[in-house]
Amino acid sequence: MLLIEAARRGFQCQALEVSIEARTLAEKVIALSGQHIPVLAAADVNWKESFNALFAFDVLEHIEHDRQALMQWHDWLRPNGTLLLSVPAHMRMWTAGDEWAGHFRRYERKPLLQLLRETGFTPEICECYGFPLTNLGERLSARVYAKRIHRDAGMDSDRKRNNDRSGTDRGPHLKLYPLLSSLPGKLALRTFFGMQHFFVGSDLGSGYLVKARRT
């Protein structure tokens, strides 16, 4: 959806999605939008210094070798290009939801910013988002994910399968949609969004949103 909005504003966009299921879903959504956004299954060998901006939201935690991934993203960006990324925060907040999604890790602020510097980026903004609503939501949904893990214990399961389904399966979140889409739910969301504004400079949230510049 973010790339669709960017395309509507005149940006030329490309997407990279290795999961067949997620790629198929993305292509359907893009087709319905009327925008032209190629969704590739693999990186183009000619991407070196091709992009002014690169978005990677809730991606890095799914990659085992995150340093190598950041170095590759650095190569794809033009000099002074912008990297926008989000990652889950704090290993102490690890739940069954992380296991179910195939995460390798959650991040801490200082090591994350240091990793960015070491891979050729200059961090400009780092906000810790989600407090208090997302923190609570992750704890509540963890029970559902734990049940799913127990249910699937006898099935063939691996991290790649978990990664692939995490991009398309929103079952636990959809259970909350009727509540969130109701008038009381919408009012509660507005309240929580307003509260979140006062905590983005803290480390209380459940995720980091970072803007960094290629140096």
Image: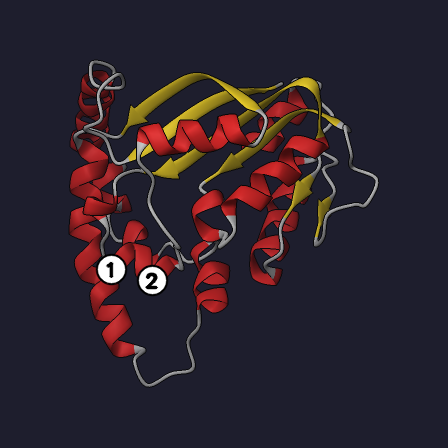
Q: Looking at the image, which residue sits at the far bottom?
A: 154
Q: Secondary structure at mark 2?
A: helix
Q: Is residue 45 left or right of residue 162?
A: right
Kindly identify the amino acid type of the residue bearing the numbered disc 2: Trp
Marks 2 and 1, how far apart at CA: 6 Å
33 shown above or below 63 = above
Image coords of residue 33 (percent x, y): 64, 36
183 shown above or below 171 = above
Q: Is residue 30 left or right of residue 96?
A: right
Q: Nearer the viewer, residue 127 or 10?
A: 127
Name the residue located 43 percent from the left edge and 82 percent from the top edge.
156
- Answer whether residue 1 is visible to the viewer in this image: no
Name the residue located 60 percent from the left edge and 32 percent from the top edge.
3
Task: Give the total of numbered labels.
Answer: 2
Q: Nearer the viewer, residue 147 or 201?
A: 201
Kindly identify the amino acid type of the residue bearing the numbered disc 1: Ala
